[in-house]
Amino acid sequence: MEKCNYGSGRGTLFVVGTGPGAVRQMTLAACEVLEKAEVIVGYKTYLELIPNFLVGKEVISSEMMKEVERCRIALTAAETGKQVALVSGGDPGIYAMAGLVYQLARESGFAGTIEVVPGLAAINSCAARLGAPLMHDFAAVSLSDLLTPWELIEKRLSAAAMADFVTAIYNPKSKRRTDQIVRAREIFLAHRDASTPVGIVTAATRENEKIAITTLANMLDHEITMQSTLIIGNSQTYTWNDLIITPRGYGNKYEL
């Protein structure tokens, strides 16, 4: 069903996922929205990845930690009748801006239209770069304790490790946070073999992309930054030809 309200005279806020970084990884829908938007709002670093879409637009950028401010600016602009795109890296509904937009819209009585335009999430692009690590049940956990208490994050890590989920680790490390990834590894080592495959993808699909395939035992020997996403395999995950593969279970049902 077509939902876009271009030219209707009614303000719309599009929360747009721009994917992992490379423009060629953006969806056609995201490109269309950005091309037709009158106002584009976003985190400075993400806007720098899409310069061609900013030409001739009203562009409002801000620094990290200004998420609430960006959302309010975007909502206000949409209420004036403009077509507004709020840019979010990856997918706006995964550790990103969509939830905050709806929360603020609800509290403010926003009368316009909001549409979420999905993007390729980090977990998808990183998995593709590593091979096929997410072929069975998986979980995603962010190690950022800015909005979530660390005690709760530890519980979620323990539950994922104990249940043998392949686990994607978002926001593993920053200049301020260096101990959380060490503790996460300890938690998984309590439930997984030290030889469990681990993939580390930094700046996926961008020019400075780095990929490391290692093990739970050795993962801390590799560079891990805020731009990294880790995928920790389950008890069945293996490596082959510099790839990480988690079997779906076809070998148990069919002759391969």
Image: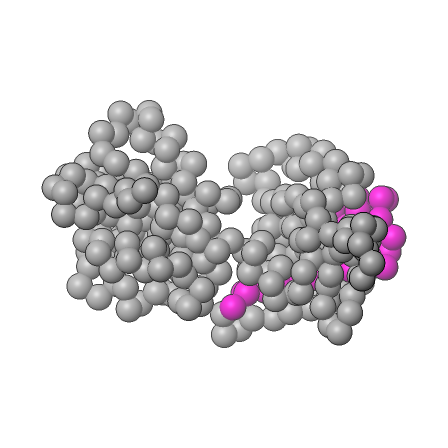
Residue 157 position in % (x across, y down): 72, 40
Question: Which residue is located at x 35 percent, y 46 percent?
Answer: 15
Q: Is residue 36 left or right of residue 115?
A: left
Q: Is residue 117 magenta?
A: no
From the top left corner, tell me how far across and down residue 65 is, in percent. Answer: 43, 46
Q: Is any part of residue 187 visible from this angle?
A: yes
Image height of 160 relative to 250, above or below: above
Q: Residue at x 60, y 63 (%)?
A: 128
Q: Is residue 40 left or right of residue 207?
A: left
Which residue is pictured at 69% across the width and 57% down the height?
Answer: 133
Magenta highlight range: 182-205
| Location of residue 161 in the rendering, given as x and y in whole percent from the top left corner | 77, 42
- Is 183 one of the magenta-colored residues? yes
Residue at 74% in and 56% down: 246
Q: Please tell me whether residue 79 is drawn above or below residue 28 in the rendered image.
A: above
| 43 vs 239: above or below | above
Picture coordinates of residue 96 (x, y %)? 46, 45
User: What is the quadrant of residue 143 in the picture?
Assistant: top right
Quadrant into which the N terminus falls: top left
Is residue 221 among what the camera can see? Answer: no
Q: Residue furthest left?
A: 9
Q: Quadrant of residue 14?
A: top left
